[in-house]
């Protein structure tokens, strides 16, 4: 017997993601899903961003097993919740749903930064109820990332090109990188930053703040 | 580790949830895989064998239909598919834009006994 199904296999995850989205809206908050390879600079970028922002911020740190990154974030006095995937290579909506309960009122009127597990494949497919995704790619990783991992560059509203301070040491074809991103995502925004020196952080955080204000007509 | 573990688990869950009450065996699962998803059919098969043990889907044959995303050249207007290292129009070498994105994983049909 044949059964026609035609069903997105991520429907169950997407359903929870919708619930998370509602919960975040109820808290007058905004959630950003930060995705990048290990070492791209996700943690550094989040910390630097929050230092430049004058908006209440909290962090959800996703990692396979460790809590090194959340301790790093906490050192800066930023509220942080650690979530572990216990081997899984990405976060899913269910994990975030639980983390939000733990954050309770500290995640109200705030920007919630979620550091996803270092990986460019699965996090592109698994929505977590975020307002938008940010993909971080760094100069030393090379200019061909959009060609090797097209899905995340298509889906991320923002592409961050990090470690721009290393540009002079690395053979990085910026035109080729931009072309890949913009072909996949013509409406995407690209910010060039150094999460260590702070280059480009003003432009990025000005844009981010605008999104936050717009969401609730503040 | 391969990236297909959770997507395979989602495939299995979806199939089992679609199974009518009077069926106890899934013999075939037809899956549509978008090329932008980054998931590889062979890896899905590998995990499926492990995950489906002791379920009604343990002997199912998996088939994959790969859907390729379409781009349109901004210069000559032709439709094209990307190659591994180029995302430009193969006819005139200009830039294009993604107009049909295939990035999801669908169950299309299943066969049961
Ligand atoms: N030169 C330079 N190094 C950076 C920059 N951002 C991060 N790093 C370094 O890159 C390494 C990995 O950064 P981290 O934030 O832990 O990356 P994550 O694994 O993506 O969270 C650390 O040694 C950082 O100091 C940057 O903009 N410029
Ligand atoms: Mg980190
Ligand atoms: Zn052309």
Image (tube, rainbow, N blue to C red):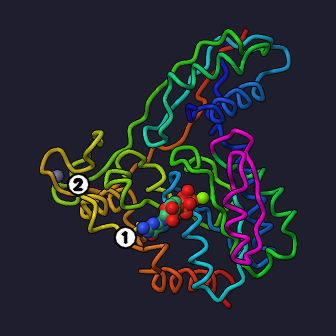
The image's mark for residue A103 is none
Kindly state the secondary structure of the residue where label 1 is placed. helix
Marks 2 and 1 on same chain: no
* Vertical position of residue A204 compared to residue B97: above or below: below
Badge 2 is on which residue? B73
Q: Which residues are magenta?
A: A62-89
Asked whether residue B102 is drawn in magenta, I would say: no
Quadrant for the C terminus of chain A, please. Answer: bottom right
Mark 1 surroundings: few (<14), some (14-19) or many (≥20) residues within 10 A: many
Camera-nearest residue between B18 and A87: A87
Residue B67 position, x and y percent, is 43, 35
Residue A29 position, x and y percent, is 73, 76
> Pointer 1 indicates a residue of which chain?
A
> Pointer 2 indicates a residue of which chain?
B
Disc 2: residue Cβ within 8 A of ligand 3's nearest atom: yes
Res. A177 image quadrant: bottom left
Cβ–Cβ under 8 Å for marks 2 and 1: no
* Vertical position of residue A67 compared to residue B44: above or below: below
Residue B10 position, x and y percent, is 69, 34
Disc 1: residue Cβ within 8 A of ligand 1's nearest atom: yes
């Amino acid at each position: 017997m044949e059964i026609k199904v035609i069903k997105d296999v991520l429907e169950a995850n997407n359903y929870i993601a919708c619930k998370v989205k509602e919960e975040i809206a109820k808290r007058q908050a905004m959630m950003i899903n930060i995705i990048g390879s290990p070492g791209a600079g996700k943690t550094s970028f989040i910390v630097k961003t929050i230092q430049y922002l004058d908006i209440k911020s909290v962090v959800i740190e996703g990692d396979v097993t460790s809590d090194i990154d959340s301790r790093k974030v906490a050192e800066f006095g930023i509220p942080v919740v650690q979530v572990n995937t216990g081997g899984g290579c990405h976060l899913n909506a269910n994990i975030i749903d639980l983390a939000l309960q733990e954050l309770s009122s500290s995640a109200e009127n705030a920007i919630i930064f979620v550091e996803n597990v270092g990986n460019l494949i699965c996090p592109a497919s698994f929505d977590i109820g975020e307002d938008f995704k940010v993909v971080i790619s760094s100069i030393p990783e090379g200019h061909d990332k959009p060609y090797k991992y097209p899905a995340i560059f298509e889906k991320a509203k923002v592409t961050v090109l990090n470690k721009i301070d290393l540009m002079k040491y690395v053979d990085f074809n910026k035109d080729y990188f931009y072309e890949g991103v913009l072909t996949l995502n013509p409406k995407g925004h690209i910010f060039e930053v150094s999460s260590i020196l702070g280059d480009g952080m003003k432009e990025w955080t000005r844009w981010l703040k605008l999104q936050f204000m717009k969401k609730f007509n503040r | 580790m391969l990236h297909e573990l959770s997507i395979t688990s989602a495939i299995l869950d979806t199939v089992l949830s679609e199974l009518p009450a009077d069926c106890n065996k899934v013999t075939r699962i037809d899956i549509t895989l978008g090329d932008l998803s980054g998931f590889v059919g062979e890896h899905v098969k590998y995990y499926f064998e492990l995950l489906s043990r002791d379920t009604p889907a343990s002997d199912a044959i998996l088939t994959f239909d790969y859907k390729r995303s379409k781009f349109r050249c901004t210069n000559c207007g032709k439709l094209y598919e990307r190659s591994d290292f180029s995302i430009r129009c193969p006819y005139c070498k200009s830039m294009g834009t993604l107009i049909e994105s295939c990035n999801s994983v669908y169950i299309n049909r299943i066969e049961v006994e």
